Image (cartoon, grey):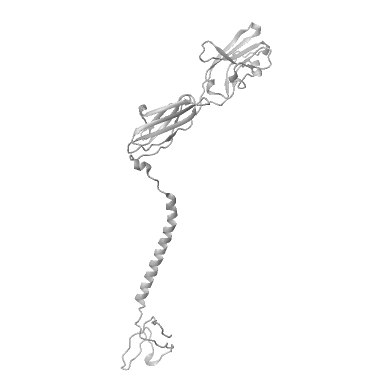
Amino acid sequence: MVGSDVLLSCIYPEGNTFDLNDLYVYWQINVPGKRNTSSVVTYYLSGNSSAGHGNNHYKDRARLSLDSMKQGDFSLHLHNVTPQDEQKFNCLVFRKSLELEKILEVTVTLNVAANYSMPVVSGPSQDEELVFTCTSTDGYPRPNVYWINKTDNSLLDDALQNSTVSLNARGLYNVVSVLRIRRSPTIDVGCCIENVLLHQNLTSGQTEMSTGTKDSITEDPVDDTQDAVNQPVLSILAVLVVAVAVAVATGWLCRRRCPYRSYAGAQAARPELELTGQFARREGDPWRKRGSTGELGAPLSLCPPFSAGATR
């Protein structure tokens, strides 16, 4: 993986021990574009106290372990892997005591990969045709790009898309893919970035839905915040309406049970006396007074009248 460390193995199979003064060790790569031409990554020469570097690209990144070489392990430690390290590395070991006879040769192929960012789909546009754009960055090696119909997971026609893959300053790939499709009642598409080396497929998340008309795409969303503010106000108004209704109903019932008599002029207040005889009030009878003819007068109201200017 880009940015990681890797150990390229080169081990003498018979498990012998070696004298460092008797060894010549080389790690080298082929020069791109130049056939049969090699460039030294790092090396160890008999009598040296440390390994050297023949390629500035690997300076401070490629290392041999002197202690391991004594045990027949000539593996290369490579730090901070870059995309340019994806190539074949050759390990060569010679013995001085055997007149520089080559005792070991190993070729190691290094494959380099980097995870792409999760693809992001923007769109659709508000034109007559729907345009979606998918972007993903900082991956390696070069990816495969697919557009899928999420309703049935089918692949969309390659002719509908236009993908651009470019190398950035880090030597990694950036991807921009544009999908153009005709407007339809329901749109649910996804963008898939495939990294073959990592056996990895990254698919974009949920995309925008279209109801098939331009107006529905540009329609303003409902303001939930405003609804939240209005709810308390509506509750208060509902309580006030109920209170007013109760007050009106109470007044109406009082008027039904306690009607006012017509104004008959000012009258002096009568003190309450305990009456006997003909003015006595029997249990359950309303107040009555006897007239001069001996007939009973009209019953008195249970609710006393109120007259403007009257004295109580």
**Dividing the image into 4 quarters, which one contains the C terminus?**
bottom left
Residue 294, image x and y in percent?
31, 93
Residue 32 placement, left or right of 250: right
Residue 296, image x and y in percent?
32, 89
Name the residue at 35% across, 27% down.
159
Residue 154 placement, left or right of 64: left
- Is 223 placed above or below 282 here? above
Q: Is any atom of residue 104 visible in this view?
A: yes
Name the residue at 37% across, 92% down.
278
Residue 117, image x and y in percent?
48, 31
Which residue is most to the top? 99
Name the residue at 42% across, 30% down.
177
Residue 162, picture quadrant: top left
Q: Nearer the viewer, residue 90 or 297?
A: 90
Which residue is most to the bottom? 292
Residue 39, picture quadrant: top right
Residue 258 placement, left or right of 72: left
- Is 71 placed above or below 166 here? above
Q: Is any atom of residue 76 visible in this view?
A: no
Name the residue at 43% across, 55% down.
230
Residue 191, picture quadrant: top left
Residue 134, image x and y in percent?
43, 32
Count of numbered circles in the view: 0
- Is 174 placed above or below 222 here? above
